[in-house]
Image (cartoon, rainbow, N blue to C red):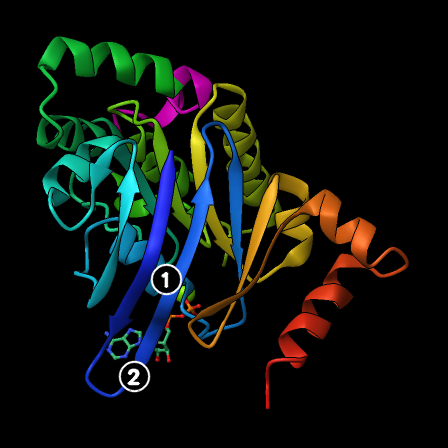
Amino acid sequence: MIQVKDLCKSFKKVDAVKKISFNVEKGVVFGLLGENGAGKTTTLRVLATMLKPTGGTANINGVDLVEDPEGVRSQIGILFGGDTGLYDRLTARENIEYFGLLNGMDKDEISNRIKELSDMLDMNEYIERRVGKFSKGMKQKVSIARSIVHDPDVMLFDEPTSGLDVTSIRVVQDFITRLKNQGKTIIFSSHSMNEVEKLCDKVGIIHKGEVIEISTIKELREKYEDMELEDIFVKLVGGHND
Ligand SMILES: Nc1ncnc2c1ncn2[C@@H]1O[C@H](COP(=O)(O)OP(=O)(O)O)[C@@H](O)[C@H]1O
Ligand SMILES: [Mg+2]
């Protein structure tokens, strides 16, 4: 479903992503795990066509990232942590609707979909309210709904739980599990091995712009039988610090 091939992204002075390659099969949740500054956000922004790669490419659901970024755009849903980019003066519904229109959906289609998403995420109570005064958790739900309004096959999540309270973290994690059960393909970044373990089938550890390990959680456990996963992460990253 996703093939990343020798992908590079350099900024003026920084080689943020250095020739990384990995594959994610359909229906798999792939965790991109790394410390701050490892290159997770840059990788995801390139895959999301928000940044142009400086080398290599990726194929997403049969569409080449470099040749047809627009085509890739229609295959993917994006949910990035930090600033949600919602319009405070619009209602939850209007925020979601706007994204639907951008994705070429018609009004009826959008309206049906919003009904479904609002039920699913338990947003009916505030769907007609302006998002300006919403809590972080409520905003995150609107962002989630917005990111999947067009029902994409591939989802890219950049640290979607960072900065959220426990309840909101659970909402996001349940949502990822639900997408997985629907057969969606997901790349999800995190700096927490525990979170990755909970949600992912396969993990890629990224460090200083390079992928230093790709395995299933099961393989990691077998290889380092007595160790906690969090310790495995620290060990692998530590081994590449010279
Ligand atoms: N727009 C940018 N301009 C210059 N350097 C950047 C830019 N974005 C990220 N970087 C650098 O690229 C590296 C990887 O950053 P990032 O992808 O944000 O890592 P992560 O998401 O894993 O914390 C860091 O050294 C960061 O400072
Ligand atoms: Mg980041």
Dot 2 falls on a residue whose secondary structure is loop
SS of the residue under disc 1: helix
Residue positioned most to the bottom = 242
The reply to whether residue 116 is visible in this rendering is yes
Of pointers 1 and 2, the one earlier in the residue sequence = 2
In front: label 1 or label 2: 2
Pointer 1: what residue?
Answer: 41
User: Cβ of disc 1 within 8 Å of ligand 2?
Assistant: yes
* Number of numbered discs overlaid on the protein picture: 2
Expressed as whole percent of the image width and height from the top left, the position of residue 213 reads: 59, 61
Quarter occupied by residue 21: bottom left
Query: From the viewer's perspective, is 51 left or right of 224?
Result: left
Q: Determine whether, in the image, residue 124 is placed left or right of residue 55.
A: right
Q: Residues within 10 Å of mark 1 (few under 14, many from 20)?
A: many
Residue 142 spot, x, y in % from top left: 33, 35
Q: Can you name the residue that lies furthest to the right here?
A: 226
Q: Is mark 2 within 8 Å of ligand 1?
A: yes
Q: Amino acid at mark 1?
A: Thr
- Which range of residues does the magenta coloring cover? 119-130
> Relative to 237, does residue 215 appear above or below in the rendering?
above
Residue 192's spot in the image, x, y percent?
62, 59
